[in-house]
Image (cartoon, grey):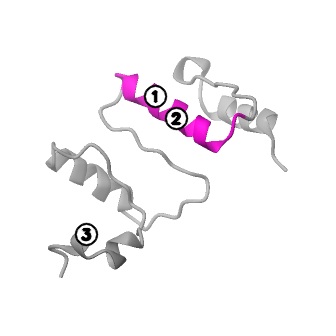
C-alpha cells in the first residue's frame, strides 16, 4: 500500500516547492478533505479554470479539451463534470434537448 510519505515524495519529484503546497490532513476523511479542497480552490486566483481529478478516472482522448472549450464558450457555467452520470439518462428533465 502506498501511504502519505510515498505520495509526498511523488509530488516533490515532479513539482517544485514554489509550485506546490502539500497539506497534511491526518486522515480527516473524504468528505472533510473535499470540503477543504473546494474552499481552497474557490479562494485561489492563480487559475480561471480548476479541475478535480481522481486517481481512478478514465478519460477518452480529447475529453479535457472539450470540457475547457465548453467552459470558455459558456460564461454562465460554474461547474462541469465529465462523468457519464446515470441521472442524465434516468431523469427526464435532464434529457431535455438531448433527443
Report the Cα–Cα distance between label 3 and label 2.
Answer: 26 Å
Q: Which residues are magenta?
A: 28-46
Q: Is disc 2 in contact with disc 1, using a CB cutoff of under 8 Å?
A: yes
Residue at 39% x, 60% y is 82
Give the class, few, some or many, for how many residues have Cα within 10 Å of label 1's Cα (few <14, many ≥20). few
Question: Residue shown at 58%/22% (left/top)?
Answer: 21
Name the secondary structure under disc 3. Answer: helix
Mark number for residue 94?
3
Q: Residues within 10 Å of mark 3 (few under 14, many from 20)?
A: few
Query: Are the residues flagged by discs 3 and 1 in contact, CB closer than 8 Å?
Result: no
Side of 70 where 65 appears, left or right: right
Q: Which of the 4 image quadrants contains residue 34? A: top right
SS state under label 2:
helix
Residue at point 52%, 64% (across, down): 58
Disc number for residue 39: 1
90 and 84: which is toward the camera: 90
Estimate the x, y position of residue 53 in percent, counting from the top left.
Answer: 51, 49
Residue at the limit of the structure toward the top, as seen here: 18
Q: Say the numbered circle drawn on residue 35.
A: 2
Could you say which quadrant of the image residue 23 lies in?
top right
Q: Is residue 41 magenta?
A: yes
Q: CA distance from mark 2 to mark 1?
A: 6 Å
Residue 15 image point, x, y percent: 59, 29
Circle on res. 5: none
SS for tag 1? Answer: helix
Q: Main secondary structure of the magenta part?
A: helix
Number of other residues with Cα within 10 Å of mark 2, as a class: few under 14, some 14 to 19, many 20 or more: few
Q: Residue furthest right?
A: 1
Residue 94 horizontal/vertical position (percent): 25, 69
Amino acid at each position: 500500500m502506498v501511504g502519505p510519505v510515498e505520495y509526498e515524495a511523488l509530488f516533490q519529484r515532479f513539482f517544485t516547492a514554489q509550485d506546490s503546497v502539500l497539506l497534511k490532513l491526518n486522515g480527516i476523511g473524504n468528505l472533510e478533505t473535499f470540503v477543504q479542497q473546494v474552499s481552497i480552490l474557490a479562494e485561489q486566483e492563480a487559475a480561471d479554470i480548476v479541475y478535480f481529478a481522481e486517481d481512478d478516472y478514465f478519460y477518452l482522448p480529447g475529453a479535457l479539451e472539450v470540457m475547457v472549450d465548453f467552459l470558455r464558450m459558456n460564461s454562465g457555467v460554474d461547474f462541469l463534470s465529465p462523468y457519464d452520470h446515470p441521472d442524465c439518462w434516468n431523469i427526464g428533465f435532464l434529457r431535455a434537448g438531448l433527443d
